[in-house]
Image (tube, rainbow, N blue to C red):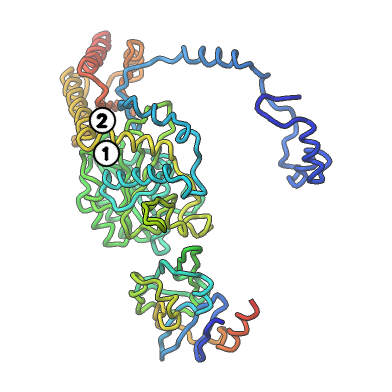
């Protein structure tokens, strides 16, 4: 059973946002890391890059697939999780603990179109 | 009706059609819209026997004239050591296709790994892929890498001193991908750094492509180019003549992000345009943007050295439209060719062969200038190829030399002749060319 955490916002493409004031930590869910298998590479944007809700901002590569990362919300990248460069497997170890990018949110209203923990869990069970 | 190369009999066809539930072969193609189907007779001549085919080709062959080659323009008459065609004729090499169950073909993967290792050494770059089809498409792939690696920039600058044939191939790919190619001005046969800087600061540039040596045989000074490109987040790419890199400053030393070009100059015969082999090398940072096959070395579960196709998550069969390119193959046999060539020649031999061409070209140039009928087109250093201005009819001059068995260069402008010399050209041949040219000039 994939782990789902209360209080986070979830997208249908299995990314989450953890809101912290005007900022959001974005990463992939436990469901996603399980489906991918051993992550070997994370293709991340750079600080000051803009991300747009629904658009690709990077990719996660595992031994069997390369999956795009879709931004659940829009904003500007203020921090990138550099640890993932040398240790991409951290995403498998703990997907929620090891966020991928931190953005300054440009439109908090976008959070309303995302799922809460309960809805996301139901969504995962359906697929 | 039995055809020599089609194994199926009429009965075979009938039983196959029956198995799939089709009434006829036409019924099998019923999904193809009528308006794209060809209706009519094939305009094919009647068949020939093996004997007749042989006679036809022998007759065509007799029309060939073998000329002593002083022409270059991207393809060079270097010597092919005899052992290479001998090794390549082995059926394991000659007939095998690019492996898809790759790890079963350890021998193939092994030689590709050697090829990659040698190309990185030659270009001074970190990574090489398993090869591209040829130098022109390798340049197109480099362009696509730059655009893919860049953040939404879709413009690529190309120096006007890059071979127009290379630019044409890049343009073909650019058109389909919505990439804009902008040419950088040349000044006296070399890339204008000022114009380069100006176009770069205009913005939107993913990468810049230059040539070394350039289309005129000139060895350009690229000091500052990589830095300027990097300051504006554009990649610096160099299209090179492989064999010349044995002597010239390597793309790695120039700070290039991508090095590409054709490997024909590594002993592959000119053979009327191909097959040749393209090489594509890059920095470690761009590894995941590199298209094509990459062979890696690892160990198996018994600790034995093993070769694999690696980083396949880059490739189009996994990334689909997000991959840098749709290429999923390489030019294995020719990559093997140049690998054997490089291992036979070694660093020292490569250098010697290249310097023989350099010396020969400079000697030829001096001799021709001394005739008084030519002047140097550009006041720039050249390697084994150079351009001369000639105010006489170049076509007639070349015709005269051809009739005497010599190919006197390539005409590159109304009044411009480009000549190349390789290690295959002896001093006697060079002197003979000069005297032929003198003879012609004296008849005027």
Above-or-below relation of B265 to A92:
above
Pick the front one: B109 or B275: B109
**Residue B67 seen in render:** yes
For disc 1, the marked residue is B213
x then y, percent, for residue B265: 32, 33
Tell whether B307 sits left or right of B121.
right
Above-or-below relation of B358 to B257:
above
Residue at 41 percent across and 91 percent down: it is A21
Q: Total label count? A: 2
Residue at 34 percent across and 27 percent down: it is B83
x then y, percent, for residue B341: 31, 33
Q: Secondary structure at mark 2?
A: strand
Residues marked 1 and 2 touching at CB (< 8 Å): yes
Work out how far the residue at label 1 is from the one at label 2, CA to CA, in angstroms. 9 Å
Q: Quadrant of residue B119?
A: top left
Q: Quadrant of residue A101?
A: bottom left
Q: Name the mark on residue B385.
A: 2
């Amino acid at each position: 059973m994939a782990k789902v955490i209360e209080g986070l916002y979830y997208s249908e493409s299995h990314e989450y946002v953890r809101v912290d004031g005007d900022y959001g930590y974005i990463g992939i869910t436990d469901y996603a890391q399980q489906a991918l298998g051993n992550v070997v590479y994370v293709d991340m944007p750079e600080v000051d890059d803009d991300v747009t809700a629904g658009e690709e901002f990077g990719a996660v590569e595992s031994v069997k697939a390369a999956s795009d990362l879709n931004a659940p919300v829009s904003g500007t990248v203020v921090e990138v999780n550099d640890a993932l460069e040398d240790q991409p497997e951290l995403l498998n170890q703990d997907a929620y603990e090891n966020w991928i990018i931190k953005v300054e949110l440009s439109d908090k209203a976008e959070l309303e179109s995302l799922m809460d923990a309960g809805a996301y869990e139901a969504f995962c069970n359906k697929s | 009706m039995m055809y020599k190369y089609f194994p199926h009999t009429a009965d075979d066809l009938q039983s196959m059609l029956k198995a799939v539930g089709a009434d006829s072969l036409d019924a099998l193609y019923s999904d193809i819209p009528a308006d794209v189907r060809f209706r009519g007779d094939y305009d094919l001549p009647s068949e020939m026997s093996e004997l007749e085919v042989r006679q036809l080709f022998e007759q065509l062959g007799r029309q060939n004239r073998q000329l002593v080659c002083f022409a270059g323009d991207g393809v060079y008459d270097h010597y092919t050591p005899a052992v290479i065609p001998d090794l390549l004729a082995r059926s394991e090499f000659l007939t095998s296709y690019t492996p898809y169950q790759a790890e079963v073909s350890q021998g193939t993967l092994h030689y590709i790994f050697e090829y990659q290792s040698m190309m990185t050494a030659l270009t001074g770059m970190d990574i090489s892929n398993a090869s591209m089809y040829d130098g022109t498409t390798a340049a197109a792939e480099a362009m696509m890498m730059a655009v893919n690696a860049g953040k939404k920039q879709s413009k690529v600058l190309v120096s006007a001193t890059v071979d127009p044939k290379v630019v044409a191939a890049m343009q073909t790919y650019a058109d389909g991908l919505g990439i804009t190619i902008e040419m950088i001005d040349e000044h006296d046969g070399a890339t204008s750094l000022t114009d380069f800087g100006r176009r770069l600061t205009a913005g939107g540039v993913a990468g810049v492509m230059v040539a070394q040596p350039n289309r005129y045989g000139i060895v350009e000074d690229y000091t500052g180019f990589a830095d300027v490109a990097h300051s504006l987040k554009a990649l610096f790419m160099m299209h090179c003549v492989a064999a010349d890199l044995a002597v010239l400053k390597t793309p790695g030393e120039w700070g290039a992000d991508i090095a590409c070009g054709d490997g024909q100059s590594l002993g592959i015969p000119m053979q009327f345009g191909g097959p040749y082999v393209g090489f594509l090398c890059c920095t470690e940072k761009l590894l995941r943007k590199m298209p094509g096959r990459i062979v890696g070395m690892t160990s198996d579960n018994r600790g034995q050295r093993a070769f694999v196709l690696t980083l396949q998550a880059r490739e189009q069969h996994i990334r689909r439209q997000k991959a840098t390119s749709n290429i999923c193959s390489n030019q294995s046999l020719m990559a093997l060719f140049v690998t054997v060539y490089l291992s036979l020649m070694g660093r020292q031999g490569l250098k010697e062969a290249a310097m023989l061409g350099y010396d020969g070209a400079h000697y030829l140039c001096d001799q021709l200038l001394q005739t008084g009928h030519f002047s140097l087109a550009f006041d720039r250093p050249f390697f084994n190829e150079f351009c001369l201005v000639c105010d006489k009819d170049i076509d007639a001059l070349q015709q005269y030399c051809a009739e005497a068995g010599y190919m006197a260069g390539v005409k590159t402008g109304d009044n411009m002749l480009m000549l190349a010399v390789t290690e295959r050209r002896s001093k006697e041949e060079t002197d003979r060319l000069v005297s032929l040219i003198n003879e012609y000039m004296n008849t005027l």
